[in-house]
């Protein structure tokens, strides 16, 4: 056991910890992301990383090769050890690595064994991290054999590296030193790192956990059968969601792995089309999060709609440019409805702490507050977008169903890896794009820095108008409910006894109620009464001074009314006055009512006869006694009182000129009491105003109808006048006139009235029929409009579905076209390589042909002593030529499958002729 100074033991690390440590990666792509992060971090700063699958000694292997800065033996040893992380910010690139554990956990999650080849321009090193090696040697500690080579391709310290080299050659895929150097040569350039992982994890059936066959340019997680029988891979947190492609496709995951990609990822020979996630959305808006625990710092949130698939939505949470959580649903997206569908939010949470596998954040109070705030912000964006859509296109599809295009187009230069913004309208881009192709001359050079982003973190980029509307509605509701509660719990008297006594002392009379109006058959006067059930108690119960009258059952209220009077006289009402008249009744004792807030509308018809009008006019000039007043009040109350003694508000509409004289003392008394009531019932005023506004609207509607009917009546009156003129004898000349006796005149007048009455009734019937026809036509119009709206909506939905299908088919066609294009390019490259090889072989054959006659001439000119040597030489040349023809034949067999090599004679020029023909055909193909 190793000991430090002072005899204190060191902590040991069991080899089994390699597997234990790797179990933090429950998802295999998170292990691959750890290896990509190591190449991305600023201490390496690789521009490209190649990820591929290969087979070495019949073992399937994963390879990761980058062109970064590489490592020396000391850095390699720290990389293969635990907890060493010396990464820092360089060139404005923040490192992703935190714990010094990524390579160990990631590589051991993918396979049991890993070997690292690295070179930094000065030295070349090889290191082995192998569970198989530790198991076979029964090691008690984790051992990592490391061998270092110098630039002369020799081991720098043979004595110390002897055992390490032996362990690597024995327990790795490479059994010789030359094979190790060949893998170091596979690293492009003077610097870089190459990692090979084998003994990949397999399932119970012996299959690897990756699917390499479904897409030859991708690495996928194989599909599984779920409980419903459907195939597909789902992460544990997405069991009830539609799975995004990034969950099971490494190519799709790598495209969104970094918020702003600064490194190219080449997966199985094809470049991953990385994207600026925050720039590839539609209807982009920015919001600001002000966490209290970061005061005064602000965090920007970007919202937009997913243009590729509306079913993939949620929050993309990044940490130091690296994706931690993808499509995390918050706010209204968690509910079982269509709210928030298609909305993607992007936030860089550098203030939170990620877990060890970098697939989640520590569940702290800061994380919970952030998720809650993101839910509120996303709800705001969703509601605002719906509000705008409904205002601009009320009949269009829902906002999540509309076909969208990204607001901006950004592309990455393949040379300098800078991102450039392109103008709108550019759809098709070449496979390799460079700054020199930029239409904007300002950014047409790789030396020009990237376009600066909008760093305004103070204010959101959009105004939340829907919130203002909701606040106004809520404010009105609160004010209305507060007013109702105030009215329900406030109890105020009708009038004080002191005021009434003072009033009696001045006037010397009691309050005289308005005389009752007896019923007649004349339907000229109508009063709709709005009865509001309210029970208000009065603390004053003095029978002499209070405005009350007694009934056999209970104390009933007195009607207080202020009729509209002319300025000159109190005896006549205003002609044609159609204003509302309010009658307030107050109960002296409160009585419970079942429905205290339900308004009831009651309509009374009060009819006046001429004799009763005269009787009422006579009562005006005489002072009425208390008994008379009481009896009249009882008559009035019996005509207007409801079942409960509640507050009554009456709206009177007088349609003809009816003169109702009222005594002066009664008017003064009622005016005085109404003033008292107006002071005590300020609380009820607002509620009554709202109800009176509704009544006014109804009144205006009825007034419009009355105007129409009035015009019709006027036309009828004109017709009546014309009929009357027929029966009236007019003077025909200035000398003689014809008169009718009074008896005959009365008969004619009676006949005219009867005819007019009949015509008037007929006109009323016609008006009623016209009203019925208008109502039926109006109903038909509404039904037709509803049907038309339904048909239009159904047609629009069908068209939208058809358009969506067309777009989906177009996307499939473009994908297939790109695949065929890439395959065609690969075949073109292979064809060029084969053509080059054929040219080289043809040149060698020509050289050999030219050397044969020279050798024969030398043989003829030489002496007999040198004959044997020349023969041996010619035999060696012929053997070399034969072997070359055999190789050419095998190469030609790959191009010409019908060529039977067993029937070919390699001692003659058959192979040469065939090669010449193939070369000529290739020249013709390339020229065409």
Image (spheres, rainbow, N blue to C red):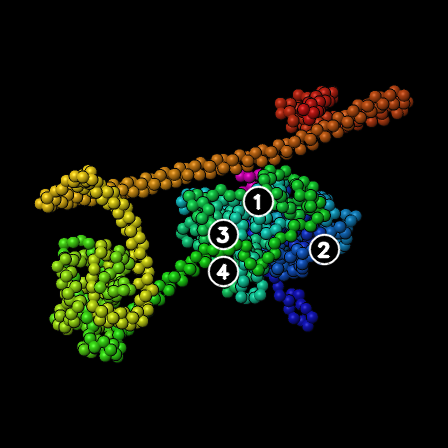
Residue reaching furthest left? 743
Q: Residue 373 shows which numbered tag?
A: 4
Q: Which residue is mark 2?
A: 73
Label 2 vs label 1, nearer the camera: 1
In what element is the residue under mark 3? strand
Region rendered in magenta = 210-216
Q: CA distance from mark 1 to mark 3?
A: 20 Å
Q: Residue 251 shows which numbered tag?
A: 1
The answer to whether residue 569 of the structure is visible from this angle is yes
Q: Quadrant of residue 550?
A: bottom left
Other residues around mark 3 within 10 Å, as few (<14) / some (14–19) / many (≥20): many
Is 275 within the magenta? no
Q: Please indicate whether residue 667 sits to the left or right of residue 355 in the image.
A: left
Q: Quadrant of residue 438?
A: top right
Residues at discs 1 and 4 in contact (Cβ within 8 Å)? no
Q: CA distance from mark 4 to mark 3?
A: 14 Å
Among numbered discs 4 and 2, the one appearing first in the sequence? 2
Label 1 vs label 3, nearer the camera: 3
């Amino acid at each position: 056991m190793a000991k430090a100074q002072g005899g204190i033991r060191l902590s040991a690390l069991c080899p089994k910890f390699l597997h234990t440590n790797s179990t933090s990666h429950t998802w295999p792509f998170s292990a691959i992301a750890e290896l990509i992060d190591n190449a991305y971090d600023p201490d390496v700063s690789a521009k490209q990383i190649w990820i591929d699958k290969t087979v070495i000694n019949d073992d399937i292997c994963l390879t990761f090769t980058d062109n970064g800065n590489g490592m020396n033996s000391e850095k390699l040893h720290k990389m293969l050890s635990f907890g060493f992380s010396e990464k820092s910010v360089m060139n404005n690139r923040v490192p992703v690595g935190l714990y010094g554990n990524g390579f160990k956990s990631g590589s051991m999650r993918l396979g049991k064994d890993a070997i690292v080849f690295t070179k930094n321009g000065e030295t070349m090193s090889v290191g082995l991290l192998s569970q198989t090696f530790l198991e076979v040697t029964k090691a008690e500690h984790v051992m990592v054999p490391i061998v270092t080579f110098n630039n002369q391709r020799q081991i720098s310290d043979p004595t110390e590296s002897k055992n390490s080299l032996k362990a690597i050659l024995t327990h790795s895929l490479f059994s010789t030193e030359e094979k190790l150097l060949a893998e170091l040569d596979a690293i492009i350039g003077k610097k870089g790192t190459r990692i090979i992982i084998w003994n990949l994890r397999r399932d119970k059936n012996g299959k690897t956990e990756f699917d390499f066959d479904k897409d030859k340019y991708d690495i996928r997680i194989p599909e599984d059968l779920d409980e419903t029988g459907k195939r597909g891979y789902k992460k544990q947190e997405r069991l009830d969601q539609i799975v995004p492609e990034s969950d099971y496709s490494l190519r799709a995951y790598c495209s969104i792995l970094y918020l702003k990609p600064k490194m190219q990822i080449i997966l199985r020979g094809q470049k991953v089309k990385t994207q600026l996630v925050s720039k590839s959305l539609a209807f982009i808006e920015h919001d600001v999060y002000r966490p209290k625990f970061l005061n005064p710092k602000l965090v920007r949130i970007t919202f937009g709609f997913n243009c590729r698939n509306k079913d993939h939505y949620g929050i993309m949470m990044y940490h130091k440019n690296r994706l931690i959580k993808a499509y995390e649903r918050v706010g209204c997206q968690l509910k079982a409805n269509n709210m928030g569908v298609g909305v993607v939010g992007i936030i860089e949470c550098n203030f939170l702490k990620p877990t060890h596998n970098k697939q989640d954040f520590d569940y702290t109070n800061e994380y919970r507050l952030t998720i809650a705030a993101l839910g509120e912000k996303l709800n705001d964006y969703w509601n605002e977008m719906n509000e705008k859509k409904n205002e601009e296109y009320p009949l269009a599809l829902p906002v999540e169903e509309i076909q969208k295009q990204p607001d901006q187009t950004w592309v990455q230069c393949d040379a300098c890896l800078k991102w450039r913004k392109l103008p709108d309208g550019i759809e098709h881009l070449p496979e390799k794009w460079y700054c020199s192709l930029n239409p904007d001359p300002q950014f047409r050079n790789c030396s020009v820095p990237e376009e600066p982003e909008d760093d305004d973190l103070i204010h959101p980029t959009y105004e939340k108008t829907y919130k203002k509307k909701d606040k106004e509605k809520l404010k009105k509701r609160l004010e209305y409910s507060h007013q109702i509660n105030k009215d329900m719990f406030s109890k105020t008297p009708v009038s004080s006894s002191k005021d009434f006594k003072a009033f009696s002392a001045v006037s010397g009379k009691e309050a005289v109620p308005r005389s009752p109006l007896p019923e007649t058959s004349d339907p000229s006067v109508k009063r709709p009464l709005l009865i509001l059930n309210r029970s208000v108690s009065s603390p004053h119960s003095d029978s002499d001074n209070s405005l009350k009258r007694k009934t056999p059952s209970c104390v009933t209220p007195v009607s207080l009314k202020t009729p509209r009077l002319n300025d000159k006289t109190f005896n006549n009402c205003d002609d044609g006055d159609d204003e509302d008249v309010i009658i307030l009744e107050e109960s002296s004792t409160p009585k419970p009512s079942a429905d205290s807030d339900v308004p009831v509308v009651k309509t009374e018809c009060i009819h006046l006869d001429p004799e009763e009008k005269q009787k009422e006019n006579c009562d005006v000039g005489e002072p009425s006694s208390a008994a008379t007043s009481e009896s009249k009040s009882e008559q009035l109350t019996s005509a207007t009182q409801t079942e409960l003694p509640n507050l009554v508000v009456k709206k009177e509409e007088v349609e003809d000129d009816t003169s109702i004289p009222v005594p002066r003392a009664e008017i003064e008394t009622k005016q005085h009491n109404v003033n008292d009531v107006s002071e005590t019932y300020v609380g009820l005023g607002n509620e009554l105003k709202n109800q009176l506004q509704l009544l006014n609207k109804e009144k205006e509607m009825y007034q419009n109808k009355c105007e129409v009917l009035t015009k019709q009546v006027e036309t009828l009156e004109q017709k009546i006048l014309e009929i009357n003129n027929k029966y009236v004898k007019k003077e025909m000349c200035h000398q003689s006139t014809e008169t009718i006796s009074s008896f005959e005149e009365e008969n004619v007048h009676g006949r005219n009235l009867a005819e007019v009455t009949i015509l008037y009734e007929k006109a009323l019937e016609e008006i009623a029929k016209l009203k019925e026809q208008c109502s039926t036509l109006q109903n038909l119009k509404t039904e037709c409009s509803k049907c038309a709206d339904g048909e239009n909506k159904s047609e629009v939905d069908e068209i939208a579905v058809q358009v969506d299908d067309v777009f989906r088919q177009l996307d499939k066609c473009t994908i297939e076209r790109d695949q065929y294009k890439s395959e065609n390019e690969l075949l073109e490259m292979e064809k060029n390589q084969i053509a080059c090889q054929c040219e080289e072989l043809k040149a060698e054959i020509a050289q050999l042909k030219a050397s044969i006659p020279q050798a024969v001439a030398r043989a003829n000119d030489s002496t007999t002593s040198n004959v044997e040597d020349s023969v041996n030489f010619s035999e060696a040349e012929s053997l070399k030529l034969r072997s070359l023809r055999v190789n050419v034949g095998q190469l030609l067999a790959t191009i010409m499958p019908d060529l039977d090599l067993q029937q070919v004679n390699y001692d003659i020029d058959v192979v040469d002729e065939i090669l010449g023909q193939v070369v000529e055909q290739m020249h013709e193909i390339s020229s065409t």
